[in-house]
Image: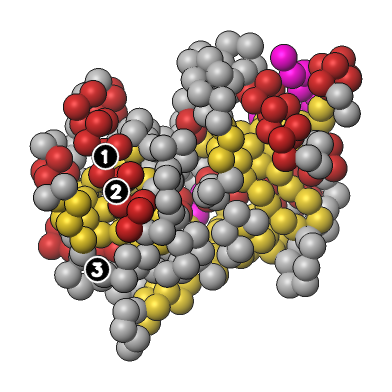
């Protein structure tokens, strides 16, 4: 399909909130097969580059400038394949170097809505391959009468109201981007005189104590966003960390993410502030949160002394600017370094509209 044809006839699209993110969901068959043409089309759909994304459906921040591309499973032991793309807001960038656990919360329902997965009479589980990382997840959600239910009683910090719960159970996330849970081969590294722990349990993350970057770690997002000196330090830190993690030049990539940690203030296990790549996140990403918790659970890691583990069997509650994120991480400590057994989280998702989007 040419650019002119796409502009005239539009592209079938579903806009969904997944967790604390919002994105456009497409069937792969509805987009150009050529990645270059596909990315150009998506940038025009989102309204990028423009800080306000006024001429597209993007929401003028990284957590709302996202795309999920879903296709029938290309292999056994899964139902669908999910490719995530992070689009820039004021810069015309499209990155597939990470996945998104928040948008994943809507992939199963989208697959049922589009006929890629069969729904059960009451509840459905969809096996999803995360194309970006090669890991898998099982998304489980209510389907009364064979249709996805979006209304429910589950609250997610950072999202007003309540919605139907979606259980996400992950496998194969350890080292799925960098090749190892500890990509540098060490639990601690020093960059620019600052101690960091670099970890990849589904998302490359650089964990650093907030106080080492001159902040408390409790600041509102707006205050962090206004701190240009902090943004410069975060960028320098993650650029150097990326080299140690084997990610190369990440000047135009949203990974690795940087998570500042501080002692918990509201009964959680740790307080966090995350940057993507240098803008403060309004909450924390699903796999970014899982990776950060994994790092804090390792003896001798940066921030381990700040971590307040929950009682056995209880999820880890991560404090973030919008509230808390509860995650589960199971580690096999008989190995050196420890190995990840499974990770899980509860999210919600909601269909916002389903129809045709017209690119610029």
- Residue 265 or residue 146, whichever sits in front: 265
Rendered residue at 67%/60% (across/down): 128
Give the mark toward the camera: 2 or 3. Answer: 2
- The residue to which callout 2 is attached is 240
- The residue to which callout 1 is attached is 236
Q: Percent x, y for residue 27?
A: 79, 42
Q: Percent x, y for residue 346?
A: 49, 54
Q: Magenta stretch containing residue 356, yes or no?
A: yes
Q: Where 212 falls versus 311 (above or below)?
A: above
Sequence-wise, which precedes: disc 3 or disc 1? 3
Instruction: Please give the range of residues in magenta.
Output: 346-360
Q: Where 175 falls versus 217 (above or below)?
A: below
Residue 246 position by quadrant: bottom left
Q: Is 106 placed left or right of 176 in the picture?
A: right
- The residue to which callout 3 is attached is 187
Q: Percent x, y for residue 154?
A: 50, 46
Rendered residue at 78%/61% (across/down): 73
Q: Image quadrant for the N terminus?
A: top right
Q: CA distance from mark 2 to mark 3?
A: 16 Å
Q: Residues within 10 Å of mark 2 (few under 14, many from 20)?
A: some
């Amino acid at each position: 399909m040419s650019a002119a044809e796409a502009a005239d006839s539009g592209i079938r699209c579903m806009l969904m909130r997944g967790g604390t993110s919002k994105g456009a969901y497409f069937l792969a068959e509805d987009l150009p097969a050529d990645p270059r043409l596909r990315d150009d089309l998506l940038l025009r759909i989102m309204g990028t580059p423009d800080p306000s994304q006024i001429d597209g459906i993007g929401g003028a921040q990284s957590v709302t400038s996202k795309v999920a591309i879903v296709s029938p499973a290309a292999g056994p032991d899964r139902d669908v394949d999910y490719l995530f793309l992070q689009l820039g807001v004021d810069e015309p960038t499209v990155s597939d170097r990470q996945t998104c656990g928040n948008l994943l919360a809507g992939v199963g329902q989208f697959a049922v809505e589009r006929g890629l997965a069969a729904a059960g009479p009451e509840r459905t589980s969809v096996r999803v391959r995360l194309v970006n990382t090669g890991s898998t997840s099982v998304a489980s959600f209510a389907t009364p009468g064979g249709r996805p239910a979006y209304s429910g009683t589950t609250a997610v910090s950072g999202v007003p109201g309540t919605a139907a719960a979606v259980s996400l159970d992950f496998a194969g996330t350890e080292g799925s981007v960098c090749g190892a849970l500890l990509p540098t081969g060490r639990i601690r590294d020093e960059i620019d005189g600052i101690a960091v722990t670099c970890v990849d349990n589904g998302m490359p993350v650089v964990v650093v104590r907030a106080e080492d970057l001159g902040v408390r770690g409790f600041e509102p997002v707006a205050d962090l966003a206004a701190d240009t000196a902090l943004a410069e330090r975060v960028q320098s830190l993650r650029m150097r960390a990326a080299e140690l993690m084997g990610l190369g030049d990440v000047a135009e990539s949203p990974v690795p993410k940087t998570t500042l940690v501080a002692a918990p203030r509201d009964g959680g296990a740790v307080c966090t502030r995350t940057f993507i790549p240098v803008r403060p996140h309004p909450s924390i990403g699903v796999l970014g949160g899982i990776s950060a918790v994994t790092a804090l659970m390792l003896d001798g890691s940066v921030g381990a002394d700040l971590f307040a583990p929950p009682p056995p069997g209880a999820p880890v509650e991560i404090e973030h600017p919008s509230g808390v994120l509860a995650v589960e991480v199971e580690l096999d400590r008989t190995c050196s370094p420890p190995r990840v057994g499974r990770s899980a989280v509860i999210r919600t998702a909601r269909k916002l509209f389903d129809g045709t989007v017209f690119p610029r």
